[in-house]
Image (cartoon, rainbow, N blue to C red):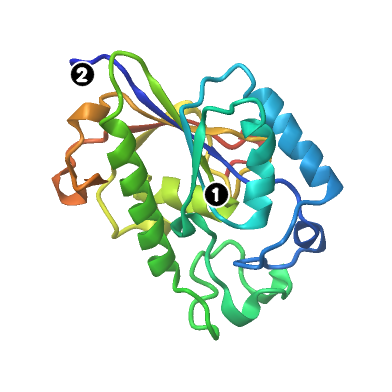
Amino acid sequence: MDSNGGKLHLLFIRHGETQDNIDRILQGLRDTSLTENGHREAQILADKLRGQTIDVVYHSPLIRIVQTIQPILADRTGVRSFADPDLTGQALGDLEGGSYDTIDMSNPRSADGGPGVELFDDFVRRLLRAFARIVGTEAKLVGAQDRTVVVATHGVGITSLFKTLECSPSCEGFNPKLAVRGPDAFEVRWTDSDDVARLVVPQPTQLPTRDGSLEWSLISGQPFVIEVWGKREKAF
């Protein structure tokens, strides 16, 4: 049992609808804005989180993410937010602006080798860097009470990170299995804009850290619990 008693909660959210989503266009690092419906979705998400204590927000710097978190922060003037470029989606180079049909959406490495495309394994490594910094920084701030962190990123990032922590077949080789999945966690290709995926660290102060970041090689067991992920009807 953690001597402090508090848990670290990470709430992962994705952006609302963009025109590229409607047109089935690969966005990657395209800095697209929310549609009118996307803004409504952002407000629905904010309403869903209205009674939720939030201590800090980390987010992708792309406009669609910034617009999504604005309603969440609107009545939380004391909550700080930090943009982290490592939380952007996979850079797709010359494929950005093209149709979903140009790649195999079920194969995370299908875009590898395209002009300017960030290799999927490199994408996962930077997600893990961001996660290590966030957890390493926030774990040491947990005291007797729980601490809750919002991570606003892209659907492919949430799925890829969770699958990597679980050491799922498409994301093997980065680390051993570090996360277990609760009964309300369902593996999905990407989360919906109104989903709030919840990952919990029951004993955050026992995690090995160095210079404010997780020491992956020293982590033992499965210290992360994926409590909520996706919707049952969209699970693989």
Residue neighbourhood size for the residue with mark 2, other residues' Cα within 10 Å, grouped as few (<14), some (14–19), many (≥20): few
Residue type for callout 1: Thr
Q: Is residue 38 visible?
A: yes
**Residue wearing tag 2:** 2
Residue at left offset 75%, top offset 49%: 17
Q: Residue furthest right?
A: 36
Which of marks 1 and 2 precedes in the sequence?
Answer: 2
Which residue of the protein is positioned furthest toward the bottom in this rendering? 115
Which residue lies at the image location 67% right of the left edge and 64% below the top edge?
A: 31
Please identify the residue farthest to the front as the structure is shown.
Answer: 77
In the rendered view of the protein, which quadrant contains the C terminus? top right
Q: Quadrant of the N terminus?
A: top left
Q: Quadrant of residue 74?
A: top right
- The residue under label 2 is which amino acid type? Asp
Secondary structure under the numbered disc 1 in the rendered image = loop
Instruction: Say what secondary structure mark 2 lies in.
Output: loop
Q: x and y percent of residue 106 in the render?
A: 58, 61
Q: What residue is rendered at 18% in x and 15% in y?
A: 3
- Left or right: residue 197 compared with residue 128: right
User: Which is more toward the observer, 157 or 68?
Assistant: 68
Q: Which residue is mark 1?
A: 153
Q: Is residue 30 placed above or below 216 in the rendered structure? A: below
Q: Nearer the viewer, residue 113 or 15?
A: 15
Q: Is residue 4 left or right of residue 171?
A: left
- Front residue of this view, candidates 82 and 189: 82
- Image quarter of residue 143: top left
Numbered disc total: 2
State left or right for residue 190 relative to residue 87: right
Residue 213's spot in the image, x, y percent? 25, 47
Towards the viewer: 95 or 6: 6
